[in-house]
Image: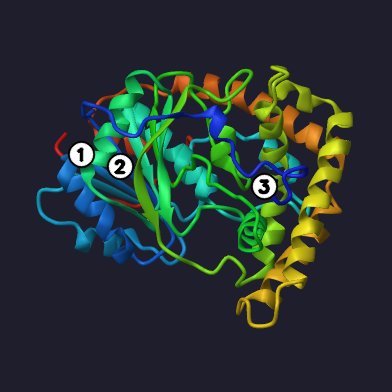
Amino acid sequence: MTELGSEHHHGSHRALIEVHPRVAKSGRVDAIVVPTIRHPRWLSHAIRLAIALDCPLVTLHSKWSKPGLANLLMPTGLRFISVDIDNPARLNLPDFATTALLKGTPFARATDLSAKRNTGLLLARLMGWRRIVFLDDDIEVGGHEEVAHAAALLDSYDAVGMHIGGYPDNSVVCHAHRQTGGHQESFVGGGALAVETTRGPSFFPNIYNEDWFYLLGEKSVRPLAVTGMVKQRAYDPFDRPVRARDQELGDVLAEGVYWLLDGDEGAGWQAAADPAYWVGALARRGDFVKDVLRRVRELPPGATTSRRAMEESLLAALGRLNRITPQFCVKYLEAWAADRDEWAAHFAKIPQLGPSVADAMKWLVRPGAQQLRQWTSFDS
């Protein structure tokens, strides 16, 4: 049976991943990095995981999450670093061209997730950590062996994701696609991702699907595998139409680039540098979202309690889609390519200091900026 919407949308990018159901050995994890905006009680699972793996836990806090309170929850003997990322402008990160391009436009993002993940990469270099695991605070890992097996695969791969079970990890539009009969899988994401930090440095741009961009290499995805299983806690993707609106540019760009990588032409993502490609990609995206919207409106009464909310979210996505032009897509990818070079040069200038938290904290902020508030229990 033909997949619903398959002519407009790829519900799976599995061909780009090496799937490893189980590996025979365990690998070392140098640190677990958790970006968080929630109450520190959401860190309980990451704390247990760090104890089981005997590795440091790095928690990067903002908004409703306070590192001082997290400090009180850390058990004796756990090596941890909790940092208050209250103002990302103070961080020692490059002035990304992608961020500048979006500034002052409807596409600008106020989130700090990418800044936190990039800070985790810098901290890894400063501390001499080669293998770190990014873990969102709403992800639960079945057992620490799952993470150790993923780390072992970093001998051969730049990044290793974990299958996300429980509630699916997708955009709002793709959630609606699945709930109306479309085939929709989850791709590797930053919510549960082991990375080798010294091999081909990459960064997370401040856009939805920032992890998909991190995983891109010169022509296709970087050497990438998936193993194990984690579980994402449930949430309502249709609770706010603004969620779909804010995701749309990142969804368009990432799905447009990966559509090329899924093909048999072997052209790589560079073909996305042509505005003519985006004329077709944007039309295809519009047809896809409209098809999902049609299916939502055809749902029988009582089929789902979120029918009205789904419709409002899809209309928000369409409204934002109508503001995206082929020329803007090309400009973004040009800026992203420049940022990759800028990040590599910046990363090379960051010293490898070894396990000195005090020295690392000095390097995490821009010269002359106020130091970050941090709590730590770490053997220097």
Asked if the residues shown at circle 3 and circle 2 are in contact, with their CB atoms under 8 angstroms apart, the answer is: no
- Tell me the residue that label 1 is attached to: 55
Element at label 1: loop
**Residue at 73%, 31% in the rendered image:** 333
Residue sitting at the far bottom? 302
Please state which amino acid type lies under the numbered disc 1.
Cys
Image-quadrant location for residue 179: bottom right
Mark number displayed over residue 128: none
| Residue position for label 3 | 1
Which residue sits at x=59%, y=40%? Answer: 12
Q: Of residues 3 and 127, which is closer to you in this image?
A: 3
Q: Element type at marker 3?
A: loop
Residue beneath the point at 54% across and 69% down: 236
Left or right side of 2 for 134:
left
As displayed, is residue 24 above or below residue 267?
Answer: below
Query: Farthest residue toward the front?
Result: 1
Q: Name the kind of residue labelled 3 in the image.
A: Met
Q: Is residue 327 left or right of residue 312?
A: right
Say which amino acid is labelled 2.
Ile
Label 2 to label 1, Cα distance in Å? 7 Å
